[in-house]
Image: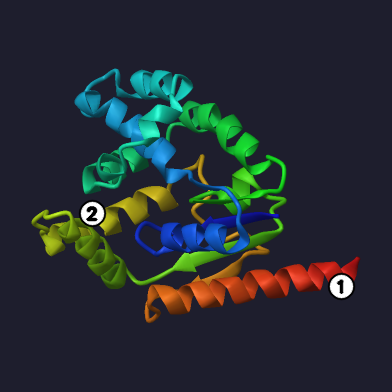
Amino acid sequence: MIIAVDGPAASGKGTLAEGLARHYRLPHLDTGLLYRAVGLAVADREDGPDFEPAAIAAAQGLDPAQLADRDALTSAEAGVLASKVAVIGPVRAALFDFQRSFALQPGGAVLDGRDIGTKICPDADVKLFIQADSKARMERRARQLEKRGLVVDRYALYHQIEARDARDMLNPNGGFYKAADAHLLDTTLLDIEAALRAAIEIVDRTMALKAGDR
């Protein structure tokens, strides 16, 4: 079973994907970490003329070991850098095969990101698109950062999220949009337990309907 979970930053898609993976005993890949790792690898060239070729080279040579430092990869800086490298077509192409191979492993997998249901796994058994309003997403991300002992400027963080959404929506190479056959789950007013219950119900119902069609 392949489960594709998409949605904007801090919508809760990563936490839900992890919960679904535990529930169904499937491997999980946070595909956003791939872009964050590439972004961090070229952070010192962000404003330079060689930013794009450096990002392409970093994507082509990405080592899975670069995904180990979760604190660095989930920082606000990494999120901004990820959205900047994600608009580069060859970067997406370089990371496509990695994601596709993970999805097609025996038994299936859960993948979350921005274009899983539309680009990476258009044939996924179940697709979910997770959304929440910007203020709720800002507060969730702020609490995550504060748990690490970081001081958070909520005003700046809110505008970072808004700016990232705008870049993602204009990304010609991505798939920020809900797939036609994806199930929409709005988590604005849901805590993680309620959201996970709702996601599991969607998966179970979808798989039961598919089994009945056979």
Point 40% across, 37% down: residue: 35
Mark 2 and mark 1: Cα distance apart in space = 45 Å
Q: Which residue is drawn at 43% across and 76% down?
A: 193
Q: Give the x, y percent position of residue 56.
A: 42, 22
Q: What element carries label 2?
A: helix
Residue at the image position 47 percent from the left and 75 percent from the top: 195
Name the residue: 21% across, 65% down.
143
Of 20 and 101, which appears nearest the observer?
20
Q: Can residue 185 be seen in this view?
A: yes
Looking at the picture, tell me which residue is in the foreground, 132 or 22. 22
- Give x and y (percent) for residue 113: 48, 50
83 displayed left or right of 210:
left
Q: Mark 2 points at which residue?
A: 160
Above or below, 23 against 97 in this view is below
For residue 7, side relative to residue 126 (left or right): left
Crowding near pointer 2: few (<14 within 10 Å), some, many (20+)? some
Q: In which quarter of the image is residue 150?
A: bottom left
Q: Which amino acid does label 2 sit on?
A: Gln
Does residue 86 appear anywhere in the picture?
Answer: no
Classify 192 as above or below 6.
Answer: below
38 in relation to 13, above or below = above
Q: Which mark is residue 64?
A: none
Residue 51 image-quadrant placement: top left
> Residue 211 in the image: x percent, y percent?
84, 68
> Residue 197: x percent and y percent?
53, 77
The residue that label 1 is drawn on is 212
Which amino acid type corresponds to the residue marked 1 in the rendered image? Gly
